[in-house]
Every structure is written in structure tokens, then in C-alpha cells.
Image (cartoon, rainbow, N blue to C red):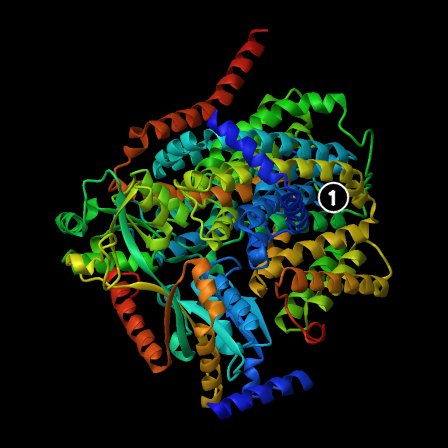
């Protein structure tokens, strides 16, 4: 799988190591704010200490790998589909946040993902997602009596 | 009363005619109950049981239950207080656990912001020991705690919950240092019960129902209940000289900023619910004890219990 | 022999036409809801509880048993077909199962999972019928220190999911452990790593993480590589059914999975995840085809699935024998019992034998029913993969978010789902293994809580870990499992040098 090119520094690998260091720092900072300790035995700080120290060690390990160029080779990335899918998810979250409703949210996510995978029929997909949303909504509210996020449309049903 | 009734029926008719038009009286035809917990838990079951009894008894035309789980109800109450303001058709189920959770989670929203309606059910706490324990009664347990609180290990529910508070109160009542109690929180009822049955801890504390079948089967010994008065089989702690009374209750509250009329209408509906035979039936099926208390008496009770809880949690160090 | 007669009587209760119908309705509902990620069998039982009010106790409890088993089947079906584990226990199934499905071997994967579940369920139910009282005596002897030792065994075996680089595997595991810290500390009630966000107080939901990493991450990864290689899914390549070879490779994992699942499931804090991981790593060590692991090895589906189902029967041991609900579903079933004024526990076997044995018998029947229903459906299920790729992935994402929305309709939860999706994508891109993250999230908090409980009871004395015979044994096993591979490797190298 991985084609190794020894001797070349992998910048992404260093970013990962940095990310792990930041994570370790966050955990360390958080644990210092804990006020209470258990009366007997180990307190709530023990585990964060272990995790934090472990992450520092792993950050070093990952950095060493990166400096040796030990990360697997990667192909060029196509960002467009990723943005489509994440955009669909963001739209879904916005629909829930601003009470636009579950059904339109589902429709947008469906159409956006489908477009990310190369389909060029956004409106048709929107319609499919819409119908799927209605079916799911009815199943949940009628059969399982679970209330999915409501919008103007859902209130009509 | 009769005027209220008239209003109620008119409201019901109006609701049928113009859906979506909100009046005070209409509150009773379409109710929304929030369970600030995931489906399946105690509050959710209370909400769904209310839904069932309200509709079958004809007290409400439709009742919708919504679940807003998270952090012992802290998330639910925040959403309720902000989203239902002035809406006389919304209720929220809550309970004693929420009192403690709001304090320990430093919730910006407090119970004062809601409109208390009524307490519905309650369950007393029971303290048990394994059947082969040398501790026979509350006096033995009190002596052991007083001698060295560290050596008496307690299994119960989550930290800061009703079980934890009861143990702290126990230590206080017998004259031991409540900050020195060796209380071990377990995740679920099953897990703590297993630890007690396996003799891993000195004593266990939980709602009586959790222990009932084990006590009857002779695997656990009941030390005492946190009731004011017990029976010969089931003695209360108070009768054994430990001044400790506490109950894990569940109640309903309404939204902040509702009018006096809206509050009255909701209280009437819940009053009828509490006195209906449908509700009595549910209490029996679920094994819940009726602890109905409404109006100012409930508001006073709520304030008192909140204060006492704050005091205990502060003394244990959970609230600064 | 008494148990045998009682069971026979139970069967006559369970095969009454009405009870058969309840079992059927139960397994159908359970399967239908079990495929939804985030909505497990527990929630289904909770939501159906009010509906079953009017049924007689026997009927409704038989229905619950059906929902329980049905839910587990549903969870593994989506794990295999669309890499979306419906519950944390079917995560191990997704690892190899989805690889099989993508290689056109979805049919055998589903079949070995269905038959394995049946075999495990049947053996475990027999175990429940005959060993429950003995097993439960042992189960309550497990103290916090013993659970901690069990977690140590699990942590050591997790390395089987690490892939080829220990550094990257450990990195994944520690990210999971870090996520496990989020939320209220179980022992002191303080918030850790919540940054003032109240939604984080309850911690990171395992299903949100698993669905984000597996399903969303996969969709992002496949989409980003479309310009390089088009993913071609063939629903069926080779045989739709299990070949003779598949059978030969499946039967031992089924039995071993059952051996892991049933006893650990019977432990009050055992759960279903640990036995599935243990089974996965055992199969990976024992297989004759190690090169297939990570690319769709049938043993990696057969074992964990059997373990999963056996542990489900295992959780009924403490429930029926002690009244201890040790899983969310068991807690709901307990509520179901109480609805009819029945208290499971030491007296239930004596007071209402017809009900207990009726339930045990109906577990058999639910299991058989699921097998009969699911095997013919295998052909239909794998057709799902023939859906055009854009719609398939769009459907997977709708599915993944729907479960989250229904279980926890909050913006924070959905944002986490998206963030875990991005994490899953990045981990795939940089070749970090994904499973250890979920493992860390599940095991970390349990290990921490149990160790701290043990030390609180012993007033801080760590010797308690060695004084308990169970704990000492388990720790020894963990130590051996940790050292043995290195020792073997060293010996091999030594041999190779000699040659």
C-alpha cells in the first residue's frame, strides 16, 4: 500500500504531530481547572494526565515518522465533492437550527451528496430527497411517536 | 370553576375549528409535554404516562411528548425556559435529580424561572446491606459511619444525585463528617445492585423498588427507608433515631411568564389528571407512589428542597 | 431435568398462535428499527411499551424478546451493507463485513452473520436456560478491580485493529481516549473538556462517533477520489450464498464468538462491545488467511456477530435471575415486567415459571424466525448495492443523520457528526486505522471508572488488583497477550538468522 520515500520531510505529518500536541495541551489545561478530587483513591485528574502524556509521546512518534518521510503516498485531492457534502451537512444543521424543518433538510442533504458523486440533476434529486424525507417523517411521528424537528411544512402533516 | 369549565369546552370547540389559534382555555385541548431526558428514562416514562392518561381520560385532545435529553435535564430546561415563554400549552416533567444537576452543572437557567404546577410521584430511598453483613440495623450502620466514614463504602447512583445526597445527609444526621463519606457512584441500577449483592461495598442506596425483590428473596437486608414513618417489616430511619427524610420525586412545571388564567387552567387539568382513575391505574402498573402536591404548597416544597440540596451539595464540595 | 421439563412447557406456551404472532411482530419491528443508526433495540422497546399495555404479560414480553434480537440483526445488516453500524456492538462486524460487501461478497457476509447469530443465540439461550443460576453467582463476584483487569485484556487485544503501524494505531486509540474524557466525570460529577457547552456534559455518543467515522468519513473519502478511481460496486461476485469454504471458515468463529459473548454478556457491567472486539482479534490471530483481514475476511464477520448475539442472551441472565438490568434494553424489559406487577429476580423463577420459560422458549422461536426471515432476504438486501452510486451515498448520509436527529436533535450533536466525518476522512487519507478511536471511546471511560471505584473501596491500595484472584488471572492473561507476539517475533527472527 504505502510507497515510502525516505529522506523527504512530510509536512502533513508534522501538522498531525502539532495537532496531537495541541490536543494534549488542551487536555492538560482543562485538567488544571478541576477543583474537586475524589476523597479516596484516584482523582479525576489521573486519566487526563495519562492521555495527555500519551499524546505528547505519540506526537513525537508521529513527527519522527514524518521527518523520515514515512507516511504513505497520497494522491491529489479533489476538494469539490467534499465541499458539496459538507455544505449539505451544514445546510441540514441550519435547517434544524432555524426551524425550517426535517423534510427540507433531508432533501438538501440528499441532493448535495448526490451532486458530490457527479450527478447533474439537482432538482430531481431534491425531489427524491423530499419524498424520502416525508416518508421518514411519517414513519417516525406516526409509528414511533418520536418528534423530529418541525418546520412549517411538518406542522401541516 | 364553572366558568372555567365553560371556557374549557368553548376552547376545545375553538381548537377544532381554528387550529393554531392559541387561547388560554385551548391549552387543555392541545398540550405539549417536554421530557428533558432520552426516551425510556424515568422522566420520559412519566411524560408518556401523562400523555396516555390525559388522552384516555378525555382531559386533553392531543398531547405531544418531546424529548430533549442531556446533562440531567440542564439542556431541556434551558430550551423550555427560552422557547416556551408565555405559552400556556406547554409543560415540562422534572424531578429531584434536576435540582441537583442544575446546581452541579452550574446551569445558567434555574427552576425559579419556571412556573411550578404540581408534584406527581415520589419514591423513598432505601438503605440496604448484603444479607450476611454484620450490620443489622440503622444503629449499627450509624455506629460504623461514625467510627470511620472511610471504611463504610456506599454504592449508589450518579455523583450529586439523590442517592449521594441521602448518604451525605445520613453522615450528617449521625454526627459524622459528610465530606469524608466513601460514596461510589455506579452508572446504572443494575451495576450498583451487583456490587452490593457481591459484597463489594458495605451498603447500598437507591429507590426502594430497585431492591424490593432482593429484599423479599432474603439476599439483601433492609436497614431503613427515608420515610417519616415505616412499618414493622420496613422500618424508617427516623424511627431508628437517624433524622433523615428524603424522596426522589417527579413533578411538572409550566413555562415562565404565563398568565394567572393560564396557570389556573393547567393546574386544573393536572389536578383532574392526578385524581383520575386512569392515572391511578398507571401508578399501580409502574409501581410509582402517589405524591400529589399542587399550588403554593408545591412551590414552597420546591423552594425548600432546592435550598436543602444546595446546602448538602456545598457541604460535600460538589457545589462551590 | 426439571429445567428441561419447564423448557418443554415453555415451548408449548410460546408456540400458541397468538404468541407466535407477537414474536413475529417483534422481530419485524426490531429489524426495521434496528437498521437505523442511533435508534437501538432499547429505544424501540421504550417507544412500544405504551402500545403493548393492552396485551397480556406473556405476549408483550415475548414481543420484546423479538424486538431485542431483531434489533441486533438490523444493526449488523447496515454495518455490512453500508458501513453504518446501527449500534456500537456491530462495529467489529462493519470492519470486515463492509469490505466483503464491496467486493461482491455481501451475500456470504450477511449469511454468515445471520447463521452465526442463530447458532450463537441458540447456544446462549440454552446456556440461559440451564446455567443462569450458577452463572449469576459468578457474575456478582466480579468487582470493580476485576472489570478493570478485563478492560486491560480488551486493550491489549485491540492492537489487532491497529493495521501495520503501532504508532498510528496508538495515535488513533489515544484520540478515542481523549474523546472519552469529554463530559461529566462519573465519580466526582465535574465537567471535563466540555468548554462550557452543556450538550457535551453527557460525553460523546458512541453511535455518533462510529457513524461519523465510518459512514460520513467513507462517503467523503470515496467522493474525493472519484477523479482517480471510480468505485465499482458489484452486488454479487461469485456465489450469493456461502460456499463450502465459507462454511468451513465460519463454524469455529461462531462457536468461539459464543464463548466470548455469553459469559461476558452475563456480567453486570460486561456489555456487548468487549466480546465482539475480543472475538475479532482472536479470529485475526487464529485465521489461516491473515492476508485477507482488512480486505474482507469472513471470520471477522462470523465471530463478532456470534459474540454480539450471545452477549444479548447473556444480559438476560442477570435480568431474569437477579432482576439486574445490565443493558439499556434489559432495563426496558424490566420496565415491561413491572408494568404487569412482575418483579424479575430470585423469586421470578419460582413464582411465575410459565412466564420465564415462556420467554426463554420464545427467544428460541424469535431466533429461528429471524433466520427464516433473513436468509431469503439476503438476495434482496445485496441489491441495495446496485443502487447508482450518487443515490447510494446520498441515502447513506440521510440515514446517518436521521438516526442522530431522532435520538438527539441538537445542533451540537449534528456538528459533531460532521466533524467526526471529517476526522474519518483525514484518517483514511493518512492511513490511520479508524476502529481504535471508537474502541478508545468505549473502553477508556469504563476502565477509568472501574479502576477508580476499586481504589476508592480499597482506600487507595493498588494491591487490590492482585489480591482478587479473578483480577490477578486476567491481568496475567493481558501481560502474556502483550508479550507473546514480541517473543514469537523475536524467536522467528532468531530462527531466520540461523537459517
Q: Is residue B179 left or right of residue A120?
A: left
* Residue C313 in picture, x, y percent from top left: 53, 37
* Residue C292 in picture, x, y percent from top left: 69, 27
**In the depicted structure, whether residue C466 falls above or below residue B163:** above
Q: Residue at x 46, y 29 (%)?
A: C131
Q: Residue at x 38, y 52 (%)?
A: C186
**In the depicted structure, whether residue C123 falls above or below residue B155:** above
Q: Residue furthest bottom?
A: B3
* Residue C117 in picture, x, y percent from top left: 63, 34
Nearer to me, B154 or A13: B154
Disc 1 marks which residue? Answer: A75
* Residue C218 in picture, x, y percent from top left: 69, 47
Quadrant of the image occupied by residue C409: bottom right
Q: Quadrant of the C terminus of chain A?
A: bottom right
Q: Residue at x 40, y 61 (%)?
A: B288
Q: Residue at x 59, y 36 (%)?
A: C12
Amino acid at each position: 500500500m504505502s510507497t515510502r520515500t525516505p529522506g523527504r520531510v512530510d509536512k502533513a505529518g508534522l501538522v498531525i504531530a502539532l495537532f496531537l500536541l495541541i490536543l494534549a495541551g488542551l487536555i492538560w489545561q482543562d485538567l488544571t481547572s478541576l477543583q474537586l478530587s475524589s476523597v479516596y483513591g484516584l482523582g479525576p485528574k489521573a486519566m487526563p494526565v495519562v492521555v495527555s502524556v500519551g499524546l505528547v509521546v505519540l506526537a513525537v512518534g508521529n513527527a519522527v515518522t514524518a521527518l523520515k518521510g514515512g507516511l504513505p503516498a497520497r494522491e491529489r485531492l479533489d476538494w469539490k465533492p467534499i465541499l458539496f457534502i459538507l455544505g449539505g451537512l451544514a445546510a441540514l444543521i441550519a435547517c434544524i437550527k432555524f426551524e425550517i424543518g426535517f423534510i427540507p433538510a433531508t432533501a438538501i442533504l440528499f441532493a448535495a451528496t448526490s451532486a458530490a458523486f457527479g450527478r447533474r440533476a439537482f432538482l430531481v434529486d431534491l425531489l427524491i430527497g423530499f419524498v424520502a424525507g416525508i416518508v421518514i417523517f411519517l414513519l417516525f411521528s406516526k409509528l414511533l411517536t418520536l418528534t423530529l424537528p418541525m418546520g412549517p411544512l411538518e406542522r401541516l402533516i | 370553576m364553572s366558568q372555567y369549565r365553560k371556557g374549557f369546552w368553548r376552547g376545545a370547540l375553538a381548537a377544532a375549528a381554528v387550529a393554531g389559534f392559541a387561547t388560554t382555555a385551548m391549552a387543555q385541548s392541545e398540550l405539549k409535554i417536554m421530557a428533558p431526558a432520552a426516551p425510556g428514562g424515568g422522566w420520559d416514562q412519566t411524560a408518556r404516562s401523562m400523555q396516555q392518561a390525559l388522552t384516555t381520560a378525555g382531559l386533553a385532545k392531543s398531547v405531544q411528548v418531546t424529548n430533549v435529553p442531556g446533562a440531567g435535564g440542564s439542556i431541556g430546561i434551558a430550551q423550555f425556559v427560552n422557547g416556551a415563554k408565555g405559552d400556556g400549552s406547554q409543560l415540562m416533567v422534572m424531578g429531584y435529580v434536576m435540582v441537583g444537576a442544575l446546581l452541579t452543572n452550574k446551569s445558567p437557567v434555574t427552576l425559579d424561572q419556571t412556573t411550578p404546577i404540581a408534584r406527581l410521584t415520589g419514591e423513598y430511598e432505601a438503605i440496604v446491606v448484603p444479607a450476611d453483613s454484620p450490620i443489622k440495623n440503622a444503629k449499627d450502620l450509624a455506629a460504623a459511619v461514625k467510627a470511620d466514614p472511610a471504611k463504610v463504602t456506599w454504592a449508589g447512583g450518579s455523583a450529586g444525585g439523590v442517592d449521594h445526597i441521602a448518604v451525605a445527609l445520613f453522615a450528617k444526621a449521625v454526627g459524622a463528617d459528610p465530606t469524608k463519606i466513601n460514596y461510589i457512584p455506579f452508572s446504572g441500577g443494575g451495576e450498583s445492585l451487583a456490587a452490593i449483592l457481591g459484597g463489594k461495598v458495605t451498603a447500598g442506596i437507591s429507590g426502594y423498588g430497585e431492591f424490593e425483590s432482593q429484599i423479599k428473596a432474603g439476599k439483601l437486608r433492609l436497614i431503613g427507608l427515608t420515610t417519616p414513618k415505616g412499618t414493622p417489616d420496613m422500618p424508617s430511619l427516623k424511627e431508628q433515631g437517624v433524622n433523615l427524610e428524603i424522596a426522589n420525586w417527579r413533578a411538572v412545571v409550566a413555562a415562565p411568564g404565563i398568565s394567572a388564567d393560564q396557570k389556573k387552567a393547567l393546574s386544573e387539568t393536572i389536578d383532574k389528571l392526578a385524581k383520575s382513575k386512569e392515572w391511578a391505574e398507571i401508578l399501580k402498573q409502574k409501581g410509582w407512589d402517589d405524591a400529589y402536591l399542587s399550588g403554593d404548597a408545591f412551590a414552597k416544597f420546591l423552594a425548600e428542597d432546592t435550598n436543602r440540596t444546595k446546602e448538602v451539595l456545598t457541604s460535600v464540595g460538589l457545589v462551590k | 431435568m426439571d429445567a428441561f421439563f419447564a423448557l418443554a412447557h415453555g415451548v408449548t406456551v410460546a408456540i400458541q398462535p397468538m404468541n407466535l404472532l407477537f414474536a413475529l411482530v417483534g422481530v419485524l419491528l426490531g429489524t426495521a428499527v434496528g437498521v437505523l443508526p442511533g435508534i437501538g433495540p432499547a429505544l424501540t422497546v421504550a417507544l412500544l411499551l405504551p402500545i403493548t399495555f393492552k396485551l397480556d404479560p406473556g405476549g408483550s414480553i415475548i414481543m420484546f424478546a423479538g424486538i431485542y434480537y431483531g434489533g441486533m440483526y438490523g444493526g449488523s445488516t447496515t454495518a455490512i451493507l453500508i458501513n453504518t453500524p446501527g449500534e456500537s456492538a456491530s462495529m467489529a462486524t462493519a470492519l470486515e463485513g463492509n469490505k466483503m460487501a464491496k467486493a461482491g461478497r455481501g451475500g456470504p457476509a450477511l449469511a454468515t452473520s445471520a447463521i452465526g447469530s442463530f447458532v450463537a443465540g441458540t447456544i446462549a439461550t440454552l446456556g440461559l436456560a440451564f446455567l443462569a443460576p450458577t452463572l449469576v453467582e459468578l457474575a456478582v463476584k466480579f468487582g470493580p478491580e476485576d472489570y478493570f483487569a478485563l478492560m486491560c485484556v480488551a486493550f491489549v487485544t485491540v492492537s489487532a485493529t491497529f493495521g501495520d503501524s503501532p504508532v498510528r494505531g496508538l495515535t488513533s486509540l489515544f484520540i478515542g481516549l481523549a474523546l472519552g474524557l469529554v463530559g461529566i466525570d462519573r465519580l466526582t460529577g465535574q465537567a471535563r473538556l466540555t468548554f462550557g457547552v452543556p450538550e457535551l456534559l453527557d460525553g460523546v455518543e458512541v453511535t455518533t462517533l462510529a457513524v461519523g467515522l465510518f459512514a460520513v468519513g467513507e462517503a467523503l473519502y470515496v467522493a474525493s477520489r472519484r477523479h482517480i478511481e471510480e468505485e465499482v460496486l458489484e452486488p454479487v461476485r461469485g456465489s450469493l450464498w456461502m460456499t463450502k469454504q465459507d462454511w468451513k471458515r465460519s463454524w469455529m468463529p461462531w462457536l468461539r464468538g459464543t464463548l466470548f459473548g455469553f459469559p461476558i454478556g452475563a456480567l453486570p457491567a460486561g456489555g456487548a462491545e468487549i466480546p465482539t472486539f475480543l472475538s475479532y482479534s482472536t479470529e485475526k490471530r487464529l485465521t489461516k488467511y491473515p492476508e485477507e483481514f482488512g480486505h474482507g475476511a469472513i471470520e471477522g464477520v462470523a465471530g463478532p456477530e456470534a459474540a454480539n448475539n450471545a452477549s444479548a442472551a447473556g444480559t438476560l441472565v442477570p435480568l431474569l435471575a437477579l432482576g439486574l438490568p445490565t443493558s439499556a434494553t434489559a432495563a426496558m424489559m424490566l420496565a415491561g415486567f413491572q408494568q404487569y406487577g412482575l418483579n424479575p429476580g430470585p423469586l421470578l423463577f419460582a413464582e411465575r415459571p410459565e412466564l420465564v420459560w415462556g420467554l426463554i422458549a420464545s427467544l428460541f422461536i424469535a431466533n429461528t424466525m429471524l433466520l427464516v426471515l433473513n436468509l431469503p432476504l439476503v438476495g434482496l438486501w445485496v441489491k441495495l448495492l446496485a443502487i447508482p452510486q450518487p443515490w447510494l451515498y446520498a441515502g447513506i448520509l440521510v440515514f446517518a443523520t436521521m438516526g442522530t436527529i431522532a435520538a438527539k436533535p441538537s445542533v451540537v450533536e449534528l456538528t459533531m457528526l460532521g466533524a467526526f466525518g471529517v476526522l474519518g476522512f483525514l484518517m483514511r487519507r493518512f492511513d490511520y486505522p479508524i476502529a481504535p478511536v471508537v474502541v478508545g471511546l468505549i473502553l477508556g471511560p469504563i476502565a477509568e471508572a472501574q479502576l477508580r471505584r476499586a481504589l476508592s473501596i480499597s482506600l487507595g491500595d493498588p494491591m487490590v488488583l492482585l489480591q482478587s484472584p479473578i483480577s490477578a488471572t486476567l491481568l496475567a492473561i493481558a501481560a502474556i497477550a502483550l508479550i507473546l507476539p514480541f517473543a514469537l517475533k523475536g524467536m522467528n527472527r532468531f530462527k531466520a538468522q540461523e537459517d
